Image: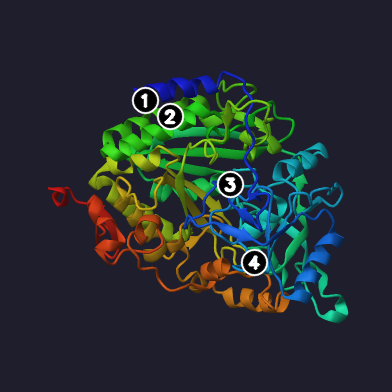
Amino acid sequence: MALLLFLTLWSLTTTTTTQAIPPPPPIQCTAGTTGCTLHNSYGIWGDRKDCFAHQVIYPTTQDQLLSIVANATKHKLKLKVVSKFSHTIPKFACPAIGDSSVLVSTEKYNSNVDVNVDGLTVTADAGVGLRDLINKVEEAGLSLAAAPYWEGVSVGGLISGGAHGSSWWGKGGAVHDHAVEIDMVVPAIETQGFAKILHLDATNQLFNAAKLSLGTLGIICKVTLSLEKGFKRSITLNFTDDGGVEDAFITHAKAHQFGDITWYPSRHMAVYRHDDQVPLTTKGDGTNDFLGFQSNLIAVSKSTRATEKALEKAKNVNGKCAMASSFIGYKKLTANGLKNNLIFTGYPVIGRQGKMQTSGSCLYSPSSDIATACAWDPRIKGLFFYETTAIFPAERFRDFIRDVKELRDLNPDNFCGVDIYNGLLIRFIKASTAYLGQPVDSVVVDFNYYRADSAMTPRLNQDVMEEVEQMAFLKYGARPHWAKNRKIAFWKVDKKYKKFSNFVAAKMKMDPQNLFSSEWSDELLFGSKEESYDGCALEGECVCSEHRHCSPTNGYFCGYGHVYKEARVCRYSESSQS
């Protein structure tokens, strides 16, 4: 009944125009209290612990940025920077613990977007939103070649976190590899006024650190990105059997400029996105309005969450598979949000690059009604999930897929939980010169899955997702997406980048007092002691080595992986409940 209600309500969202509540601001300050709290867009961090800032500043000019850094340098204050969107899972933006921490928001530092038509570049303030940037570029008859699929990010955030689309062509799918200049405010000596602006480009080795800085080097004030003459894209989604996907991915990436693959293991299905550049003269005015990023009726989001919670509690795998089948069928029917004009009428869907390369319509509706919202808005108690993103050298990805298939074939229904969301999304990033970018042409795999309301509540088929996660990061040495993942993805991450020491050296030069570091960023970058407390494996804070790291009282015990034998996972045992 709940599933039927969900499908009925969901279908209404595609035919009814409503207004949505925009996402909440990430910084919350309560009157009469000292300091403020920083959240990410999901309303909760990986460890479920809040971030606090003693002081929050909203600069609007470059001179104000200089003044902020100068004051912090002079008085040895800790600084962190966050955007209007705060769309990150790890705590790189969290200020240092203590009363000397200052949080700088770039929300209001967003006035300037300068398009150089002849030079094929655009220069923007760090706080400019991606959608505003794209619209200015398209108005000038040009196109930005790379963007993440979610547009709720700022220009500075794009550079800092390694945001990407999908492409092995040209400069590749990572946005930071399209940066040609970066201006950054960093600490300086007293005779320089305690702060200075570094104007960095490819002639300066510090540029390779600044291109993907994780907010640990200074404050990005301006970014210049390369552009192309305006073009359109033609997209066709091919829903087919997943046979041979482990061999087809390279051919697909080479054949289609912006191609990706969505793999639904439980359904034995792969969706190949044939996505290519076409001339502006090509007929078509399509839009990419991805279903997951549209405004959803709040009742739908809450119903979906309630249904999934009930299925989890009942350990009802069949119910999850029914949800997965229904959702995938709906995605196929609606081209997953692609629209030829106002609706989807058939392939190919052709439209301007600016309307096809990224999406996030739930961000922009006015707040005059509270009927709809982004499905994960923390205020509505809707979708709540983990997001794991692993980045593989291309030559190792084939074996990873084979391992996942072997695990899947033991019981395909165990993967229905991940297929309720977006399955395994496979994208492509080209080798980068950024010290913390990908050193070789790489394959990115994203997957989302249910997260419980309580940190101590285990998940249905938890062991399966943990085994896949450990296959990726431990067996195959995959690198984490810097703005996503649970803590275990960052274990020994410094060993996975040959030029990590170059990044550290650049940091020592640009921020010698470590003003832009915190306990959180240091822990992710340089590692920390392994957690060992009751239930630590449930949220990816540790890999279990004792039963208490799981949830013995709920029948979840630490065991070995089925395919990756070295994996240690929390597995449910019915016998323990007798």
Residue 273 image offset from top left, x and y in percent: 52, 38
* Residue 510 in the figure: left or right of residue 504: right
Image-quadrant location for residue 373: top right
- Asked if the residue under mark 1 is in contact with the one under mark 2, i.e. CB atoms within 8 Å, the reply is yes
The answer to whether residue 402 shows anywhere in this view is: no
Label 3 and label 1: CA atoms lie apart by 27 Å
Label 2 and label 4: CA atoms lie apart by 46 Å
- What label does residue 433 carry, if any? 4
SS at badge 1 = helix
Q: Which dot, 2 or 4, sits closer to the camera?
A: 2
| 151 vs 298, nearest the viewer | 298
- What label does residue 41 carry, if any? 3
Dot 1 corresponds to which residue?
Answer: 2
- Asked if the residue under mark 2 is in contact with the one under mark 3, i.e. CB atoms within 8 Å, the reply is no
Residue 275 image offset from top left, x and y in percent: 58, 39
Q: Tag 1: Cα neighbours inside 10 Å, few (<14), some, or many (≥20)?
A: few
- What label does residue 303 carry, if any? 2
SS at badge 2 = helix
